[in-house]
Amino acid sequence: MQQELNILDVLNRLNMKPVKTPKGRHWIYRCPFCGDSRKRDNHGHLYVEVNKNVWQCHRCGESGNALTLYARLTGQDTKSAYRELVGGMESRIKERPTPNTPPRPQPVRPYGSEPEMVSLEQRDAVYNALLDLLELEVRHYRDLVRRGFPAEIIKKEKFRSVPADYSLRAQVCRELLSRGYDLVNVPGFYKDRNGSWNFVASPGYFIPVRTALGMIAGMQIRADEGSPKYFWFSGHDVAFEGQIEVAGPQYDGPVWITEGPVKAKIAAYYLKRTTIGIPGVSAWRKAMPVLNDYRDRDKILAFDADAAINPHVAKNLQAFTEALYTERHRLKLARWSINQGKGLDDVILYLARQAHGQIEKQLVPMSLWDKVVGWLKKLFRKRG
């Protein structure tokens, strides 16, 4: 049976809070795509019509429904986003109206009607030019250092702060256009109500997501506050899906697999191993073509330490493992105590600061993963 997501449940899952006490059918939020107004804490332009399960920003024009909002902020296609939402919110999903019930009005610009994004080469050129025009604020530099990034990697990766000023962003776009860069169908760029170019913004800093050749396939924004902490630099004017980070392609040895570009970059630097960062645990299918390029090397799965107690994570980890096994990849699991950190980047920094020698050898089996290890052993015995 077809099911429809409740937009308020989706907003709660994204930890988005209304800026004003809801009145009537419209709930008002800050827009995560244009950065919205920063003059007043209780001021926002993203209007949610709860009766119709649709939303629209009256400042930048972005619009969609519950599913597209979640898909775009988590960097997934709508199919993967739907599976993830249904898996975690089954008890809150409303059934789609029967044929005797009038259908809900659709958004003005339904997701899926957008043109395809430009080629990797054009994205890389535009994003590099954009980052060259921006600076990294001291507070963001310090945050990256706190995360474990050394100065040379911060410079090499081109982390940059997102300009908070709307007019400054417009000026940057004009400069890009004057240098001959075409912004049409480049994810993250859009034309405002006056027909002027601007780009998606929220207080935070850009994280380039790179291919094995070092090209920028896409970018995330690490938000200074609020949730989600990370969202994709994309807009409603062009179709976009989360990209795969390939960090440390020059290294030999086993290939590590984790979630997100930041964890992948940290792991590659400290472990001296090629590390694949997937957009999210439910987006593992996107990583398969990349991993098949490293078929002759061992793979080490290093998802967050809550995999055994989070049903959604465990379910996707099992599906990912089975797919890799079917493709005849050699698999291992990295495991650690949750007391050392939740994510791979956390435990790597913990071990590095403890000066425990080779970090890779310190990622030992822990009881938290017993359930995952159990079904893996059964799987290997069954197919061995």
Image: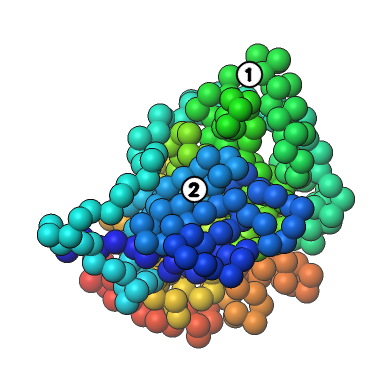
Q: Mark 2 points at which residue?
A: 56
Q: In which quarter of the image is the N terminus?
A: bottom left
Q: Which residue is drawn at 66% across and 48% down?
A: 35
Q: Vertically, is 281 above or below 111?
A: below
On the rendered structure, is 337 left or right of 66? Answer: right
Q: Residues within 10 Å of mark 2 (few under 14, many from 20)?
A: many
Quarter occupied by residue 43: bottom right
Three-letter code for the amino acid on which mark 1 is drawn:
Tyr
Q: Which residue lies furthest to the right in this view?
A: 138
Of mark 2 and mark 1, the one earlier in the sequence is 2
Q: In which quarter of the image is the C terminus?
A: bottom left
Q: Vertically, is 242 above or below 199?
A: below
On the rendered structure, is 359 left or right of 209? Answer: right
- Of 218 and 314, the residue lying toward us: 218
Three-letter code for the amino acid on which mark 2 is drawn:
Gln
The image shows residue 14 at horizontal and vertical percentages of: 52, 64
